[in-house]
Amino acid sequence: MVVDTTLYDLLGISSTATEADIKKAYRKKAIQHHPNPDNPNASQKFQEIGSAYEILIDPNSRAAYDQLGVEGMSRRGRSGSSREEDILESLFSGRFSFDFGMGGAGSRRPRKGEDSIIPYEVTLEDLYNGKSVKLMMEREVVCHSCKGTGAKGNAKPKKCVRCDGKGVSMVNTQLGDGRIGVTRAPCSDCSGKGSKLRDKDRCSKCKGATTVKQKKPHEIFIEKGMPDNHRIVLQGQGDEDPGIPPGDVIFVLQTQHHDSFERSGSDLLTTVKITLSEALLGFSRILITHMDGRGIRVSSPPGKIVRPKDTIILRGEGMPVFKQPDEKGDLFVVLEVEMPTEQWLKTIDTQALASLLPPKKPDMVPMPAIVDEARFERSDISAVPHSNANTRVQFGLDDEEAWEDEDEDDVPLDQCHHQ
């Protein structure tokens, strides 16, 4: 026997209707009451019809409704198993937000508290070497004095007068052309709870807020090789709310800019300056002080000339691999050749130097018909004015261009080794 026909009446069908009858009636009612700016009440009616359909089309929820009715299902959900609560949440708090008078705003009860997302800056050294960080955190915890009720002793909250215990109130919204829309919003007097305590009935410790602030020390571990934007989760350490498990505290790692190294996954990139003598005659010295304090000695192969912007690769000197700290990526080194200064040039025999260096290039052949003299003047390319966004790219100053690993067959000094 059906104890409540409210949902059947919404769809205009009998309690013995078949699944096909329910679908047909829903389509007809949905078209009839589709939301219309000229009829603000149509939106609410459309939601009610949709929620009724959601319940009646499912055999299990329809059977429960036929046996218990709306109020019976509500009471059973609040006192039943967690599975029954989940079913009621999906029925009464789904996408249609149908209000069955269950108290409050009829909104879906969260399964746990909100997570706290905290951006946390780290250096590249922190991610290379690993680090533990001790910090003092403050959060909201359930008041032990009132056990999270917010009330003194056995005082009970009273039904909110403004929303009549529903937790929502109707708000008029100007739609333009003189039209007024009506929307539902959480009641501002009771914060959407449907009830509130009188001032004299509030807990003296939490002042009716149900929670108090608590400071507690924590320690987080930054593991070697963690990537940028990695999330370190402290489970259950978020703010508490009565009746639900607390959320998590999530630290999101944000890597600071490094003056010497640039990271790409498990690989590193750096730039080292060498002298013209080293570029021509080779070198064997400590090129880099790594992020763990080690000096990295590199020897260039005999007879190899280093050209400006040549790149060498140092295997196994990159970032530690996350969760596999004994393995490391590679370190790519861009070699910049420093030219001697004018002061140095004044101290040497330039004719002797010229006899040792390759000859200068002669004028081009054939000569152009017209040749003008231009004055030699040093300049800074970054000072060149540009009138459009493409100018910098054409001058080769696009800082956003990502660097790519070069194939070792294309690296002139791939035989360099470090000790």
Image (cartoon, rainbow, N blue to C red):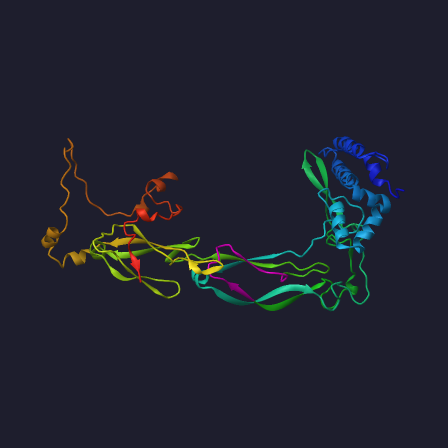
- 409 horizontally vs 282: left or right: right
Q: Is residue 100 left or right of residue 372?
A: right
Rendered image quadrant of residue 145: bottom right
Q: Nearer the viewer, residue 154 or 275?
A: 275
Rendered image quadrant of residue 197: bottom right
Residue 116, magenta (yes or no) = no
Q: Quadrant of the N terminus?
A: top right
Q: Position of residue 249 (x, y in %)?
A: 60, 60
User: Looking at this view, is 415 or 172 the one in front?
Assistant: 415
Tell me the residue at 19%/43% (across/down): 375
Q: Which image quarter: residue 61?
A: top right
Report if residue 223 lies within the magenta region: yes
The region drawn magenta spans: 219-237
Q: Is residue 211 left or right of residue 157?
A: left
- Residue found 61% across the figure and 61% down from its top: 235
The front one of 1 and 95 is 1
Q: Position of residue 47 (x, y in %)?
A: 75, 39
